[in-house]
């Protein structure tokens, strides 16, 4: 089940010029704008998130028809300057990103319900003309000094 799910969402990330950073248990961490950025990184990330939720709905329909367990995912997307590069130990290194923006995306992902794509205010600022998104109540997120008022993606325009 997980390999089938990972295959579907990974293909969506790649189709939108994203970089698959890693699988973390049942989660996927993707980057847009690293190692190479474009003027549409935020829009590509949001499109990918929207399409991932559509793919999970299709995946669940197929699984329901086969009388198999279904899944739900929540997605968090944040825009920020991060540090990108290879990190690790002398025995293994991998390309990744670190910084407050990574932590914000992870916290938004944790706060997202099944079927949700939550956008940071900065991300919404970049994609406002391409999405319908509803402002949510302010949230105090673990490890964040200031509360955040995310936006729930409703649809792509």
Image (cartoon, rainbow, N blue to C red):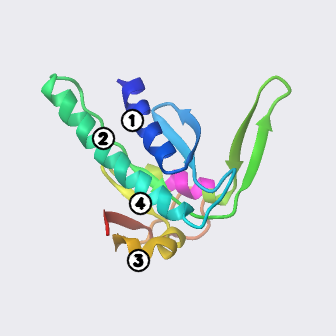
Residue ID for mark 2 = 56
Tell me the residue at 42%/39% (across/down).
9
Measure the alpha-carbon separation of dots 2 and 4.
16 Å
Measure the alpha-carbon separation of dots 1 and 4.
20 Å
Q: Which mark is residue 8?
A: 1
Q: Are marks 1 and 2 in contact (CB under 8 Å)?
A: yes
Circle 3 Cα neighbour tier, 10 Å, few/some/many (<14 / 14–19 / ≥20): few
Using the image, determine if residue 146 lies above or below residue 3. below
> Regarding mark 1 in the picture, which secondary structure is present there?
helix
Identify the mark nearer the N-term, 3 or 2.
2
Measure the alpha-carbon separation of dots 3 and 4.
16 Å
Identify the mark nearer the N-term, 1 or 2.
1
- Residue 4, percent across and down? 37, 26
Q: Is residue 52 visible?
A: yes
Circle 1 Cα neighbour tier, 10 Å, few/some/many (<14 / 14–19 / ≥20): some
> Regarding mark 4 in the picture, which secondary structure is present there?
strand
Quadrant in the picture for residue 151: bottom left
Left or right: 154, with 10 as reference point? left
Residue ID for mark 4 = 118
Residue ID for mark 3 = 129
- Residue 12, percent across and down? 43, 44
Tell me the residue at 69%/50% (across/down).
35
- Residue 153, percent across and down? 35, 64
> Regarding mark 3 in the picture, which secondary structure is present there?
helix
Left or right: 10, with 146 as reference point? left
């Amino acid at each position: 089940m997980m390999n089938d799910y990972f295959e579907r969402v990974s293909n969506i990330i790649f189709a939108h010029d994203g970089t698959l950073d890693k699988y973390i248990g049942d989660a996927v961490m993707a980057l847009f704008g690293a190692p190479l950025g474009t003027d549409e990184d935020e829009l590509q990330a949001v499109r990918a998130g929207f399409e991932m939720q559509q793919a999970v709905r299709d995946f669940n329909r197929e699984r329901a028809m086969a009388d198999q367990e279904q899944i739900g995912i929540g997605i968090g997307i944040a825009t920020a300057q991060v540090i990108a590069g290879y990190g690790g130990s002398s025995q293994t290194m991998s390309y990744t990103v670190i910084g407050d923006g990574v932590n914000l995306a992870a916290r938004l992902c944790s706060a997202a319900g099944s079927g949700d794509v939550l956008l940071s205010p900065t991300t919404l600022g970049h994609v406002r003309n391409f999405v319908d998104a509803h402002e949510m109540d302010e949230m105090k997120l673990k490890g964040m000094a200031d509360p955040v008022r995310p936006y729930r993606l409703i649809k792509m325009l």
